[in-house]
Every structure is written in C-alpha cells, then in structure tokens.
Image (tube, rainbow, N blue to C red):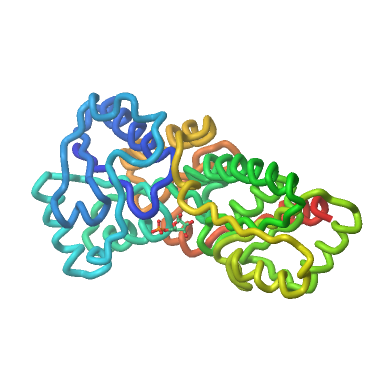
C-alpha cells in the first residue's frame, strides 16, 4: 500500500477532524502518500480527490465538523455509482481507503471492498454510538456534553417557572445519547427506543414527583422512540395532566457541532493511527474500535449488523435515579 485516501461520510461528528489528522499524520510517518476525498462517497463519484499535505491538517484537531465535508450519497448505493467511484480511485492510484462514519458509511466501505477488492478500513464516527465493536464512537462524548450543557440551561428556566420540559435528543434509532443525557442531567424520566415506557407509567411518575415537591421536571425523549418524539409525548401528557405548564425543546443539530471533547480527541487520534497501521498489516474490511481501552478490529459486517445493545446496568441507573 502506497497511497491511502480518507473520507468522512454521513452525519458529521465532533472529532472527525482529529481522526482525519491522525490518519494523515500516520500515513506520513510510514512514508505513504495521503489523499482526501471531499464530500464522502459523493465526492468519490465526482472525483473530488486531492493530495493532502501537512498544511491541510494543521489546526484541525480541535475543530468541530469535518474539513473534508460530508454527504449522504444516494448514487453510491447504485452499482453504477460505485463503478464511477472506483474508476476515480484508479485515476489517482489509490490503493486503500479509510472511511470515517456511521453504519451507512461503513456499509458502503464493506460493499465496495466486496465488489472491487479495494482494501478499506472503518473508523466509527457518529454521535449516535450505535456501532458494535467499540465502546464509544467518535463524537458521542462531545454530543452528550453538549446535550447536558443545554439541558442544564433548560433546567434553570424550568425551575423558575415550575414547568415540565420534554427535551428531544438525537440518536436515530438508538438511546445512548438519551441515557447519558438523562443520567447526567437528573432527568425525571428518559424515554429510549430500546425500552417501552407506557404513557400511564410516565404520568404516575410525574404525579409522584409533584407530590414530592420537585421544582422542575425534565423528561428526555430519544428521537427514535416508538411512542413518538417529544412533541407527541408532550401532547399525550397534556391531556392527562392539564395543570402542568408544558414546553418542548428539540436539541437537534446543535448536538453535532462544537469542538470535540478531550475524550473524542484522544479516541479519534488512537483510531486514526490504528486504521492506517491496520491497513499496513493487511486488516481489510474491518472497523477499528476501542474496547476496554484497547484497540480492536471488528469485521465491518459485524459492527453494523450487531448494532450495540443498550447497557442494562445503565438503564437500571436511569430508573433508580429518576424515581
Ligand atoms: O447519525 C447522526 C444523526 O445526527 C442522527 O442522530 C440523526 O437522526 C441524523 O443524523 C440526522 O441526519 P441529518 O443531519 O441528515 O438530518
């Protein structure tokens, strides 16, 4: 392997820049030529491929977003799109790929490897933390910090007005951000897609808290919940508890921005090194992750299909602390 290209794809996540930097620096360390593919797979199809030099990666580690930009490519899902992409890689003599992204992006790398045999390795980059084969994904810690910081502010105004807030957090179909935000902000309840909480139980919990003279109530709702988003749940609760002054806040994309936390910078950097070294050791079609503080390589097919389970102990902590 002499020429490696790196791309970021899907929803951006804080720490992606730190991961790109680590990949490129490690490539230079091993005397490789490094390329950046702009706008993910879409850029691969459109031939937005540029050689990267040291100057491209200076002062990026600490910045949110991804300087390589990101996209969700529909064309790459088609065999024709992938053919165009492969031809462009050939034009630049690219031998191997590092793909930084979530499950959709890693699925793309897996397919591409199967069809064209181009050595590819993944780095889990998503705020959702929903990939197996790693304890944490790059961006998750920062997103949790951002959510908790925002909820602290909501708590101030909720307390001043004795209000009940429903705060919706991201996570797609997974409740990891919600669980951490719930624990970290002393939520009255945390609703996640993985566990059903009947509305009646939520009503009972809120009534009990009123009796206990709790000054403010924050309910965290994961966006992918089966009983609906924060607005829908709030509507249902309003019907049963009309005396509550209820407000809804959707945190949305603010959870995707901001400078990466120390944890995300370190994780991204370790995985960047691991990705390039993995490729040089012949580890293809795998994702580099960290489990128990050790780098591990998991077949991409397993990392995406085995979508991580919510930790039962974490959920128990949520339950105990919000009663
Ligand atoms: O996968 C990251 C994520 O932020 C999810 O939490 C969310 O559901 C989705 O991306 C939003 O995607 P978009 O930015 O395309 O609206």
Looking at the image, residue 199 sits to the left or right of residue 255; the answer is right
**Quarter of image, res 28:** top left
Q: Residue furthest right?
A: 211
Residue in the image at 82% along x and 53% along y: 320
Give the quadrant of the C terminus.
Answer: bottom right
Q: Residue at x 49, y 31 (%)?
A: 266
From the top left corner, tell me how far across and down residue 307 is, in percent: 53, 61
Q: Does residue 121 appear left or right of residue 174 in this picture?
A: left
Viewport quadrant of the N terminus: top left
- 123 shown above or below 45: above
Closer to the camera in the image, 51 or 143: 143
Please tell me whether residue 3 is drawn above or below residue 311 in the rendered image.
above
Q: Position of residue 36 (x, y in %)?
A: 23, 40
Residue furthest left in the image = 91
Q: Is residue 243 left or right of residue 101?
A: right
On screen, residue 60 above or below 126: above
Residue 30 is situated, as x and y percent measured from the top left of the image, at 27, 28
Quadrant containing ligand 1 reads bottom left
The structure residue drawn at horizontal position 53% and vertical position 48%, both measured from the top left corner, is: 134
> Which residue is nearer to you in this view: 89 or 233?
233
Figure label count: 0
Image coordinates of residue 78 in percent, x first then y, are: 23, 70
Pick the residue in front: 280 or 32.
Answer: 32
Res 101 visible: yes
- Can residue 309 be seen from the camera position used here? no
């Amino acid at each position: 392997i002499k020429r490696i290209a790196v791309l970021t794809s899907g929803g951006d996540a804080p720490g992606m820049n730190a991961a790109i930097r680590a990949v490129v620096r490690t490539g230079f360390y091993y005397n490789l030529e490094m390329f950046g593919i702009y706008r993910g797979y879409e850029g691969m199809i459109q031939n937005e491929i540029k050689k990267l030099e040291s100057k491209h990666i200076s002062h990026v580690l600490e910045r949110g977003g991804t300087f390589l930009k990101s996209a969700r490519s529909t064309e790459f899902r088609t065999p024709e799109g992938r053919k165009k992409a492969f031809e462009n890689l050939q034009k630049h003599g690219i031998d191997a790929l590092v793909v930084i992204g979530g499950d959709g992006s890693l699925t793309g790398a897996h397919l591409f490897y199967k069809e064209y045999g181009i050595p590819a390795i993944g780095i889990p980059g998503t705020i959702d933390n929903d990939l197996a084969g790693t304890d944490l994904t790059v961006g998750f810690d920062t997103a949790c910090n951002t959510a908790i910081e925002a909820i602290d502010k909501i708590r101030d105004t909720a307390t001043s007005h004795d209000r009940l807030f429903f705060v919706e957090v991201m996570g797609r179909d997974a409740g990891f951000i919600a669980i951490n935000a719930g624990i970290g902000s002393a939520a009255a309840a945390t609703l996640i897609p993985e566990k059903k909480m009947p509305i009646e139980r939520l009503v009972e919990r809120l009534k009990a808290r009123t009796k206990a003279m709790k000054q403010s109530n924050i309910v965290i709702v994961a966006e992918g919940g089966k009983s609906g988003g924060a607005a829908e749940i709030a509507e249902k609760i309003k019907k049963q508890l009309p005396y509550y002054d209820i407000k809804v806040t959707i945190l949305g994309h603010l959870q995707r921005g901001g400078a990466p936390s120390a944890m995300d910078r370190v994780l991204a950097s370790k995985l960047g090194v691991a990705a390039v070294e993995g490729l040089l050791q012949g580890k293809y079609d795998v994702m580099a992750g960290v489990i128990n503080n050790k780098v591990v390589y998991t077949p991409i097919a397993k990392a995406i299909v085995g979508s991580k389970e919510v930790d039962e102990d974490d959920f128990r902590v949520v339950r105990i602390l919000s009663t």
